Image (cartoon, rainbow, N blue to C red):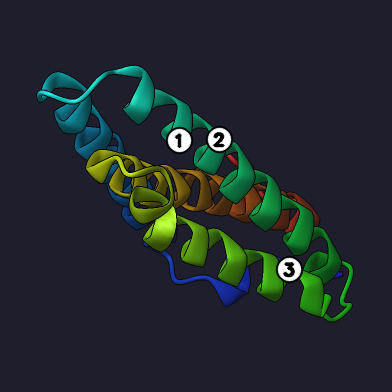
Amino acid sequence: MRDDRAWPSNAIPVSAGVAVGALAVAVYFALSDAEVVLVVVPFVVAAASGAGLIISAIRYSLRGEAIPTRFSLLSLALGLLGLNLSWIIDVDVAGAAFLSGAAFGLAVGNIQAIRMARANRGESVG
């Protein structure tokens, strides 16, 4: 079993900062001239995908197993979709909202992964 020593001690505050920044970007776009649904839907879909991806992948690592290649490929696909979403549906803010949602989900997922890893070491996760 692996534990949380793979992460630097400030990983949770940094991840929280990334999550807040990504959320701020989505709020900015939602309050701009964009239609709110074209910001909220891509953000939520990407956030859920990013969080689910990292939490699923970390379970392999915590068991001491290699993370399957499919998680790297899914991460790449998530990023490429975000980069091309504005072009695909012809809405400028959708891709940025998707990428900020992915960053939010990965950051929140990373916080949860660290907490899961700490539980392996038996520390309080506060």
What whole-number distance in Å separates the C-alpha atoms at marks 1 and 2?
Answer: 5 Å
Q: Amino acid at mark 2?
A: Val
Residue beneath disc 1: 42
Q: Are marks 3 and 2 in contact (CB under 8 Å)?
A: no
Q: Amino acid at mark 1?
A: Pro
Q: Residues within 10 Å of mark 2 (few under 14, many from 20)?
A: some
Query: Looking at the image, which residue is at 41% across and 45% down?
Result: 98
* Spot occupied by residue 112 in the image (x, y as percentages of width and height): 61, 45
Q: Please give left or right for residue 41 compared with residue 17 in the image.
A: right
**Which element carries disc 1, helix, strand or loop?**
helix
Earlier-in-chain disc, 3 versus 2: 2
* Spot occupied by residue 117 in the image (x, y as percentages of width and height): 70, 58
**Which element carries disc 2, helix, strand or loop?**
helix
The residue nearer to you, when weighing 45 against 122, is 45
In the picture shown, does residue 92 fall above or below 2?
A: above
Asked if residue 12 shows in the view, the reply is no
* Spot occupied by residue 86 in the image (x, y as percentages of width and height): 34, 49
Q: Please give left or right for residue 84 compared with residue 2 in the image.
A: left
Q: Please give left or right for residue 17 compared with residue 99 in the image.
A: left
- For the N terminus, give its image quadrant: bottom right
Asked if residue 51 shows in the view, the reply is yes
What whole-number distance in Å separates the C-alpha atoms at marks 3 and 2?
Answer: 17 Å
Earlier-in-chain disc, 3 versus 1: 1
Q: Please give left or right for residue 98 compared with residue 54 in the image.
A: left
Residue 45, disc: 2
Q: Amino acid at mark 3?
A: Phe
**Which element carries disc 3, helix, strand or loop?**
helix
Residue 71, disc: 3
- For the C terminus, give its image quadrant: top right
* Spot occupied by residue 94 in the image (x, y as percentages of width and height): 34, 40
Q: Residues within 10 Å of mark 1 (few under 14, many from 20)?
A: many
